[in-house]
Image: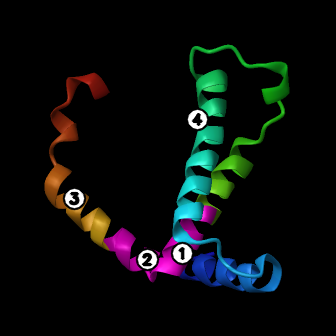
Amino acid sequence: MTINELQATVDRWIKEHGVRYFDELTNTAVLMEEVGEVARIMSRRYGEQSEKESDKNKDLGDELSDVLFVLTCIANQTGVDLTEAMAKNLEKKTKRDSERHKGNEKLF
């Protein structure tokens, strides 16, 4: 699925099953909540915190998909073409950081 297809699929899902988009501020809060769920898994499963029994069955892929879904909702409702935005962002990063990380001793 391309990013454009993702945006269209999410838009169709919202219209068929979600009635309408939550407003932008609500979706921003929902995004933070979903990112928090990813952070909880990461800190407990891959970080130094111990994983609670109730967290052991959490699916990281599912939680990342929740983040992507809400992020896509925000892009759709604010008129952001994520394909175009990502291309511009990668171009910016390439210009700014093309050599920066190669000299970072911490990465070797």
Rounded to the nearest angstrom, the CA distance separating label 3 from label 2 is: 17 Å
Residue 94, numbered circle: 3
Residue located beneath label 4 in the image: 39
Residue 98 shows up from this direction: no
Contact check, label 2 and label 1, Cβ < 8 Å: yes
Rounded to the nearest angstrom, the CA distance separating label 3 from label 4 is: 27 Å
Q: Counting other residues with Cα less than 10 Å from the Cα at mark 1, is it few (<14), some (14-19), or many (20 or more)? A: some
Asked if the stretch drawn in magenta spans residue 52, the answer is no
Residue 3, numbered circle: 1
Query: Residue 27 placed where, x, y %?
Result: 58, 63
**Which structural element holds mark 3?**
helix
* First to last magenta residue range: 70-87
Is 99 displayed left or right of 108 in the figure?
left
**Which structural element holds mark 4?**
helix
**Which structural element holds mark 2?**
helix
Residue located beneath label 2 in the image: 83
